[in-house]
Amino acid sequence: MSKRLYVFLSLALTSLLILVSVGKANANHQAQVLGDSTTSADLSIPPTTEGPGLILPDSPLFFLDQLKQNFRLLLAFTPETRAKIYKDIAGERIAELRFMLAKNNLNAAKVALDGVASNLKNASAQVSQAKLTGRNVDTLAKTINDDIKAKQETLDILENQATGEVKSQVTSAQESLLKAKAEVEDSLQEQELKNEIKSDLIRKAERKVDNASDSARELQRDLDELNKEVGEASKNSLNAREKAIKKAIEEKNEALKKVEEKLLEAEQKKQGKLLEVQGKVSEQAKEAIKKAQEAAIGFRQAVQNVTQIQSGSQGNSSQGSNTSGSSNSNSGKSGGESNSGKSGKD
């Protein structure tokens, strides 16, 4: 075998090893992005008060269940009745979501998840329609609003467990529920509306903080995976160089040995620099995670402090009112005694 051909084959083998390793890293990354790493064993939600429909989303006859529900809606002649039916359907879907996760059927779980969001959106729309006709919908609006909040809390648990595409689907459903809640809130009584707006703003801020923390953790996982794959590629590349040198020694090919030694030295320097840079990036990611977690803790503590201060202010206000009343009473009493005394003198 000629020296040129041997060098060519050696370089080709090294390149092939690197490409295979990089391809593996890309496959792992794709699995994370698409949510392939998420299985039903990783996902679960607490039991719900509602029960599933007779036909589950994983059944080929599921369309019959949907036809039955459409028929129920067809017979509902008022927006209030339709709103309640949509709420009940959403309850069935959240129960079915739990069953589909347990069955490891993520496609059917998505159908149930979409059903939760779409039906509560329709329920909110029906409440708005009833309000436009001049009906009193205070109680109905509160019922739908409370139901949406319950579903949000359930999906919060699922969203924290999920990754990749599944997480994106849950997040999308959460956004739909947020819009539905905003619509039904317009039909609440004034004080309840103020409380819900405040609650929604706090929830929105908390989700942003949590998402930032999740993004930082995902970045760290990606970097760890990349470091692992690059480390393996580097190891394979160096092993290939060392084997080439050993082969050259066995063949007593000094020229080829010197070429391979220089290539090995260059590869070692390159990998050393690469690992150094990756180490710095990894440290920066860890620092970002730490700051995101500190921000989340700080934000929740701030919300708790505000709530405590407000509670204290309300208590002081009531106490102040009582004190004021007592003062007025004493003042009146004092005034009475003064007038009485004056009358006696006259």
Image (cartoon, rainbow, N blue to C red):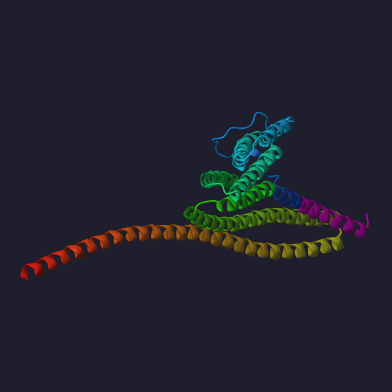
Q: Which of 154 and 144 is in front in this view?
A: 144
> Position of 63 compared to 213: left or right?
right
Residue at horizontal 56 percent and vertical 35 percent from the top: 50
Residue at horizontal 11 percent and vertical 65 percent from the top: 340
Type of secondary structure dominating the magenta stretch: helix
Q: Does 19 appear in magenta? A: yes
Q: Is residue 249 visible?
A: no
> Quadrant of the image for the C terminus?
bottom left
Q: Which of 251 and 168 is in front in this view?
A: 168
> Quadrant of the image for the N terminus?
bottom right
When asked about the image quadrant of residue 266, the answer is: bottom right
The boundaries of the magenta stretch are: 1-23
Q: Is residue 143 above or below residue 280?
A: above
> Position of 297 compared to 123: left or right?
left
> Position of 6 compared to 142: left or right?
right
Residue at horizontal 44 percent and vertical 57 percent from the top: 304
Percent of width and height locating residue 41: 63, 38
